[in-house]
Amino acid sequence: MRLDVYLTPGELAPGEIAERTAVVIDVLRASSAIVEAFASGARALFPVASIEEALRLANTLGRDEVLLSGERKCLPIEGFDLGNSPAEFSPERVGGKTLVMSTTNGTAAMALAGGAARVLVASYLNLSAVAADLARTGAEPVLVCSGRERHFGLEDAAMAGQLALRVMEATPDAEWTLNDGAHAAVALARAWPDPAVLLPITAAGQAIAAAGLGDDIPFCAQVDLHDVVPVLHDRQVTVPAPGAAAAEP
């Protein structure tokens, strides 16, 4: 069984993931916001690369039915309904809504991972739920760290390591082969087991705090807050009905 971690999106080769399950990780903050949105009852979410594409898609879907969300340089995009702070994605704001999201790192990584057989969205908020999904489906996962502006992000790598450890613990009879990125991620997870300690010292965490959004950091550090596994399929993120997950080809 293979378990690979790509520490930056630039390492991802589409041909290597075509028949595998990819897991996109952007702890600070896109994947955390997406998990929170679905835990709050969002209907669907469309991740897009650019502000222009977000506006076009929202108009196509019907602006009255869609919430625009996202950030640039940590801050909410002017004219959008929501930023990228997970606490904004409350049941009152997003329940029953369709979202169109554009962020600096996370939505770009989702686009790169789109060629996988399955694409899941993971954060500390749904860590155990994603690990259980991977173990149950027999996946040989590829964990994709969104990083920060295509560079290494410590928070994403450490969370990938935590996810790798949980998947291996849940499949004690499997013989796992890890790539170098996975070995590095596991080492980081063991060195930084508590995200509440780790996230504030990372470059991303410091940038978020400097932007006046420091409350997002402890929010994103919560472990296993939700039992939801968002899945990207045909450029749309949803949470499939229970029992809808398929085993890896």
Image: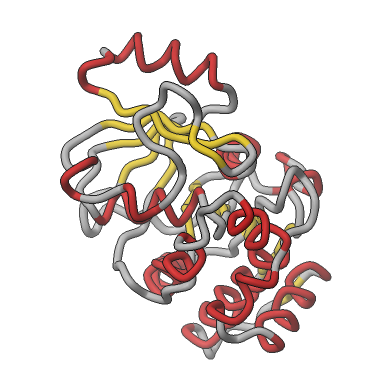
Give percent across and percent down for residue 210. 63, 55
Could you tell whether 145 is left or right of 183 in the image? left
Residue displayed at 67% across by 61% down: 206
Residue displayed at 64% across by 75% down: 161
The residue lying toward the viewer, choosing from 176 and 52, is 52
> Taking 215 as reference, is 80 above or below it?
above
Q: How many marks?
A: 0
Give percent across and percent down for residue 176. 67, 79
Residue displayed at 55% across by 60% down: 27
Quarter containing the N terminus: bottom right
Quadrant of the rendered image containing residue 179: bottom right
> Taking 237 as reference, is 229 above or below it?
below
> Taking 161 as reference, is 169 above or below it?
below
The residue lying toward the viewer, choosing from 222 and 114, is 222
Quadrant of the rendered image containing residue 158: bottom right
Could you tell whether 189 is left or right of 244 in the image? right
Scheme by which the image is coloured: secondary structure
> Taking 248 as reference, is 70 above or below it?
above
The residue lying toward the viewer, choosing from 187 and 89, is 89
Give percent across and percent down for residue 118. 49, 48
Residue displayed at 52% across by 61% down: 214
Give percent across and percent down for residue 136. 39, 71
